[in-house]
Each structure stands twice: as structure tokens, then as C-alpha cells.
Amino acid sequence: MRSLSLLALFLVACGRAAPSGGAEIAVEGAPPIQVETLRTRLVPVSVDDPYERRRVRFLTVPAVELLDERFGPGWREADEVVFGCADGYRAGVSVERLLRHRAHLALAREDADFSVEKRDGDEVERVPLAPAYLVWEPVEGGAEVGWEWPYQIVSIEIASEAERYARMRPPEPASPEVARGFATFRTECARCHSINGDGGRVGPELNFPASITEYMDEAWIERFILEPRSVRFRTAMPGLSKHVDDRETRARELVAYLRAMAGRKLPPGEE
Ligand code: HEC
């Protein structure tokens, strides 16, 4: 039964997979990466894939090598590399982590078409990965499994912390509670949500023109952050990670931060 349903999923995914010809990845301030031109230099790498939860071999280009080629060595002085995905997800990966560990841009999979099986509870979905997927070689203790593994990467940007979060910064002076909420927002929320237009686009903008705290009761926002499905049936919002310490306090601080931002609305700039 199980193999039958997996086969069915696989067939559906094949029908949906985007054609790989002509795919490109936009690069800020440089010509786009034409995926086809990288195919001659692919190297197989085995990783512990966090979606399939097993070892998978991909055909890859080393991320640091590619970044050096595209941006020159200057990118190594920045804070973050932001990988933009087809659905608006924005994964910020620290430059320090990229230099210390071995990340690769995967462009194909060795044993199957270029996709992974993503599990969400009992649901299994076959997700296409093209144009590119960021994978990490195993590190001690398996910590890399909790890092960002963005797929369907369509853009790469180099960002300084100040630049990337300028529009998300709370008004000064910020209380310690608001400052902690801002810190949590950056690590846990900004990849999917924007504030004043900056950030990810998987979820809705939370500050402009109306702040979420102006039209949703704060106790309900807290509850939504902690257990989204206790508020909305089948919502796509994942909820604050169970790995975050003292989740109730963090949720309260997040709401304090969102409330503070209601006093600092900036019209999103032209994109
Ligand atoms: C993986 C992407 C993702 C992450 C990470 C994420 N969200 Fe969401 N969020 C969504 C999506 C998608 C929706 C819309 C779902 C819905 O309306 O039910 C949403 C909805 C919301 C809403 C309701 C907005 C409205 O107007 O209805 C709030 C508030 C919210 N998220 C806050 C947060 C906070 C705070 C964090 C960080 C702890 C966070 N989200 C992390 C994807 C995400």
C-alpha cells in the first residue's frame, strides 16, 4: 500500500516538474547564473537530507567556489547570503557558517529526478528542487539538519545585517522585551514574512499598511504563533519552532515587537 501511494506521488511530481532548460538564478549586481553552464562541473556529494531524513547523493557545485566567482572575494566580509526561492521564501545563511562548513549548490540528484519527498506529519509530498537546492555536508552531531536547506533557489544576494533589517528595526529606544522580539523575528519569522515590505513573501506582510496588532487581538496572535492550527484549520503557517527555548515568553516578546512596529510604518519601496 505504502509503495503504491509513493509511486502515485512520484508520477504526479513528474507531471509537474519544471523543464530544466534555460533555468537561471538571479545574482545581485552580476549577470545571472545560467544553470546549464554549471552542468559540466558537477561533483557528487552525499548529505543527510532533512526532508527525506536519509542519505541522498546530489550532483553539486561548491557554494563558496561559486560565490567567489560571482561576487569576488568581497562577499566574505558580508554578514549573510540570502537565497531567494520561487515561492518567496528568503533563507538568510551567515557568511561565517558558509566559510566554516561545506555547503553545495545541488543541480541534480543522482538516483532519481531532481526532487525530494517532504514529510509533514502523515502527509508526504514530492517537491521539485530546480533550479537549485542548497545542501550541507554532514557535521558532527547532525546539527546541519536544522540549518537552512532552501530549494527552488531563483536568486542569490549578499547582505549586510544593517541593510537587510533596516526597515524591520523597532523605533528607538526599544525596550529589552521589544529588542528580544526583534531578534526572534529575524531568526524565526523574517524568511516568510515581511515588515514594511522587507523579508519573505510566503506569509503576509505584518506591518503595512495596517499592523497585525491593529486588527487581531494580541492574545490570539500569541496563540497563533505558538499553535497556528488551534486557531485556523489547515493554515500553512508552521508555528514557532518547538526547538526554541521558553516559547511562551518568546511569543509574548514577538507580539511586543509587532506592536512597537505599528509605530514605525514605512511604505514598501519599489521592488
Ligand atoms: C514557513 C513560512 C512561515 C514562517 C517561518 C512563519 N510564518 Fe507566519 N504565516 C505563514 C503563512 C503562509 C501565513 C498565512 C496562513 C494563514 O493565513 O492561515 C502566516 C500567517 C501569520 C499570521 C497571521 C497573519 C494574518 O493577517 O492573518 C501571523 C500573525 C504570523 N504568521 C506570524 C508569524 C510569526 C511571528 C512568525 C515567527 C515566529 C511566523 N509567522 C513564521 C508562513 C510562515
Image (cartoon, rainbow, N blue to C red):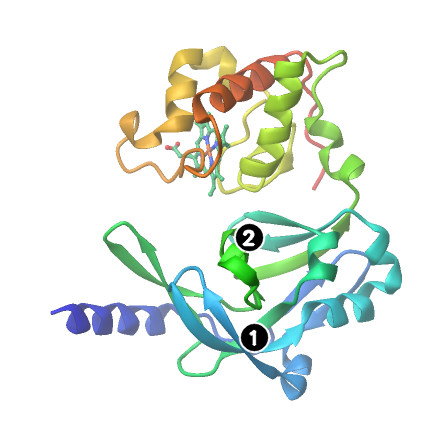
Which of the two discs, 1 and 2, sits closer to the camera? 2
- Quarter of the image with the C terminus is top right
Is residue 23 toward the left or the right of residue 68 in the image?
Answer: left
Mark 1 vs 2, N-terminal side: 1
* Residue at x-position 39% and y-position 80%: 112
Confirm or reject: label 2 Cβ below 8 Å from ligand 1: no
* Residue at x-position 79% and y-position 43%: 160
Q: Position of residue 12 (x, y in %)?
A: 29, 69
Amino acid type at image mark 1: Leu
Is residue 128 toward the left or the right of residue 151 in the image?
Answer: left
Q: Position of residue 238 (x, y in %)?
A: 40, 39
User: Is residue 101 in sight in this rendering?
Assistant: yes
Q: Position of residue 164 (x, y in %)?
A: 73, 39
Q: Please state which of residues 128 and 148 is positioned toward the viewer in this rendering.
A: 148
Callout 1: 10 Å neighbours few (<14), some, many (20+)?
many
Residue 107 is labelled as: 1
Q: Position of residue 222 (x, y in %)?
A: 42, 19
* Disc 1 + disc 2, Cβ < 8 Å: no
